[in-house]
Image (cartoon, rainbow, N blue to C red):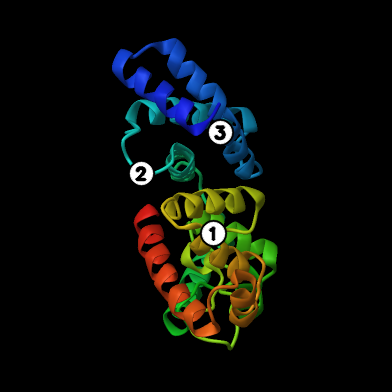
Amino acid sequence: MTDEEFNELFQRYKETGDIEIRNKIAEKYLYIADIIAKKFVGRGVEYGDLYQVAALALLQGIDKFDPTRETLFSTYITSRITGIIKNYFRDNLRMVKVPRRLGEISVAVRKYSAEYEKENGKKPSVKTIAQALSYSEEEVVRALEVGGTVSLDGMAGSAEEESNKSLYALLAVDEDKFDEFELRETIRAAMHDFTDIERKLIKYRFADGLSQVETAKRLGNMGQMQVSRLERKLLARLKERLTKAI
């Protein structure tokens, strides 16, 4: 099913409220519910329960989504399902007594993370926190889950110039396959109106890791300074859109 055919299907559902159409849409995106449910396995809730929560969030999301918006449905629904599952965990954690030591570690981790982010402009990785506080990485991960703190591996960059940072620095993401998928979908939506040259520039610089000089050679019709100016412009546009998306 092409994007155009899907949009037409979505529009028909909005006009008719036909449950069969809604089910067709849901079938197309149940894989997202499955990915997100698996992401949260191992935190005290069975996969089947998580999948039910994710599937219900998908159905609710279909009803609430506005197909006239520029946002891709896949981007919208991944964010919605993730948020609902996180709320589900928070609600359940309130009913579970957290072990005293884990609670103490969680407080220390949150305090350190806040100070680190204030000083460095980014969140610390699990490894950084563990080394700084003399905890095991497993203890830090459990504390992050309890405290709801998001951990980053930091921002990748080079000395070439200030704007040369990984696009991963524009979103707070964890290191697993789901988050990579979610990030790609979010960036894809943010780049919906980019020209072919603009898309290639982003790909060469941040997916392939080429320098500005190498990127200019690949593009063929612009020099390094032009690449630099356009890159800053595109990153500013992306950052604005990605900030609104999260």
Which of the marked residues, 3 or 2, is nearer the chain's N terminus?
Answer: 3
Q: Which mark is residue 173?
A: 1
Q: Quadrant of the C terminus?
A: bottom left
Rendered residue at 53%/66% (across/down): 167
Q: Which residue is mark 3?
A: 33
Circle 3 packing at 10 Å, graded few (<14), some (14-19), many (20+), is many
Dot in front, 3 or 2: 2
Instruction: Using the image, tell me which numbered label, if any, was put on residue 45.
Output: none
Closest to the observer: 186 or 218? 218
* Residue at 54% in and 54% down: 183
Q: Characterize the local packing of mark 1: few (<14), some (14-19) or many (20 or more) Cα atoms within 10 angstroms.
A: some
What whole-number distance in Å separates the C-alpha atoms at marks 1 and 3?
Answer: 18 Å
Q: Amino acid at mark 2?
A: Glu
Q: Position of residue 39 (x, y in %)?
A: 62, 44
Mark sitting earlier along the chain (1/3): 3
Q: Amino acid type of disc 1?
A: Val
Q: Check the image and report above or below for 203 versus 16.
A: below
- Label 3 is placed on what type of residue? Ala
Q: Is residue 61 above or below residue 112?
A: above
Q: Is residue 114 visible?
A: no
Q: Which mark is residue 70?
A: 2
Report how far apart the C-alphas of labels 1 and 2 lie in the structure: 23 Å
Front-most of residues 182 and 191: 191
Q: Can residue 25 be spotted in the picture? A: yes
